[in-house]
Image (spheres, rainbow, N blue to C red):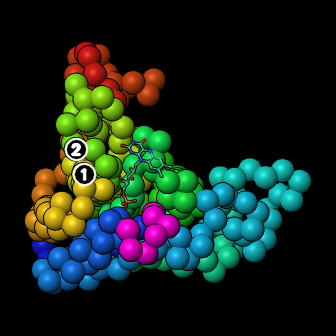
Amino acid sequence: MPGKNKKVLIVLGHPEPNSYNAALAATAVETLEAMGHEARITNLYAKDLDARVTRADFTEARNPDFFAVMREQANAFKKDAFVPAVQAEIELLQWCDGLILQYPIWWFGMPAILKGYMDRIFVPGVAYGRGKWYEIGPLAGKRALVSCTADCGIEAYSPRGRYGDLSVLLWPIHQALRFTGFDVLAPAFTGHVSDGDEARAAGLAAHAERLKGFATDAPMDFHTEDDYADTYTLKPGVKGKTIGQWGE
Ligand SMILES: Cc1cc2nc3c(=O)[nH]c(=O)nc-3n(C[C@H](O)[C@H](O)[C@H](O)COP(=O)(O)O)c2cc1C
């Protein structure tokens, strides 16, 4: 998406409207709109979205006797059979050409409601399927940023930090976003979240500064189809270049 006037969707996974995370989402809207982009927040808790994929996501059952989630989702995509709450989120995801996932780190992962959002909205046809994945995935050409928070500083999430390298922690989500085609930016981390007003103002200012490069920053490097053998492994001699793939 490099360039101006982009449509950015911020998916907020935090239960408190006045949280630091909500403030980071509001800062993102303000910063991106000041740059000429259009930005919207989808507030998962405010919408009371279920974290679980259930049959309630669909207006019809392809197979009422056995709930095969992927098949039901593919069927619903084909037949316009998602309930309005799911369909609305799918349309927002398709509307955007930039996505920001904004959430607090909970148990070294994302809040369940945000994981549920991905389980329920990143469905076949919308985010993957029919051999379309990674660089040719349905969401190719869009860019995504994971923006997460913690009470500690980034040192705790450094390679020798107590909690380990942030990129290791985020590998599954980065991989999921790339799987669907997104260009994935290096993550935004806001720490010291409980350190008071001054630290909060500094954190919000740093986030605004970081987002100035949202439309233009070079994305992270992932392997492409040419690097893989039929065995789903890197071809001999191709050096692993992501945090999840290493060695020769
Ligand atoms: C359920 C839960 C699990 C948490 N797990 C982690 C964790 O694994 N690592 C961490 O650094 N902080 C963890 N925290 C702290 C939050 O990341 C931190 O309080 C949050 O980022 C602050 O943002 P907020 O003020 O917007 O809530 C956890 C907090 C909660 C409530």
- How many neighbours does mark 1 have within 10 angstroms: few (below 14), some (14-19), or many (20 or more)? some
Q: From what the image shows, is residue 17 above or below residue 185?
A: below
Residue located 44% across and 28% down the image: 232
Number of marks in the rendered image:
2
Residue located 73% across and 60% down the image: 54
- How many neighbours does mark 2 have within 10 angstroms: few (below 14), some (14-19), or many (20 or more)? some
Quickly name the residue at label 2. 153
Query: Element under label 2?
Result: loop
Residue stretch in magenta: 13-19
Where residue 3 sits: x, y (%)? 12, 72
Asked whether residue 135 is in view, the answer is: no
Q: Residue furthest right?
A: 65
Where residue 235 sits: x, y (%)? 31, 22
Quickly name the residue at label 1. 192
Asked whether residue 194 is in view, the answer is: yes
| Residue 173 as seen in the image, left or right of residue 81 | left
Asked if the magenta segment contains residue 18, the reply would be yes
User: What type is the residue that disc 1 sits on?
Assistant: His
Q: CA distance from mark 1 to mark 2?
A: 6 Å
- The mark that comes first in sequence, 1 or 2, is 2
Residue located 45% across and 63% down the image: 13
Q: Residue furthest front?
A: 196
Where residue 66 sits: x, y (%)? 84, 50
Asked if the magenta segment contains residue 35, the reply would be no
Residue located 46% across and 70% down the image: 16
Which one is in front, 204 or 213? 204
Which one is in front, 186 or 192? 192
User: What type is the residue that disc 2 sits on?
Assistant: Gly
Asked whether the residues under the numbered discs 1 and 2 touch, taking CB atoms below 8 Å apart as contact, a structural biologist would say yes
Which quadrant of the figure has residue 113? bottom right
Which quadrant of the figure has residue 5? bottom left
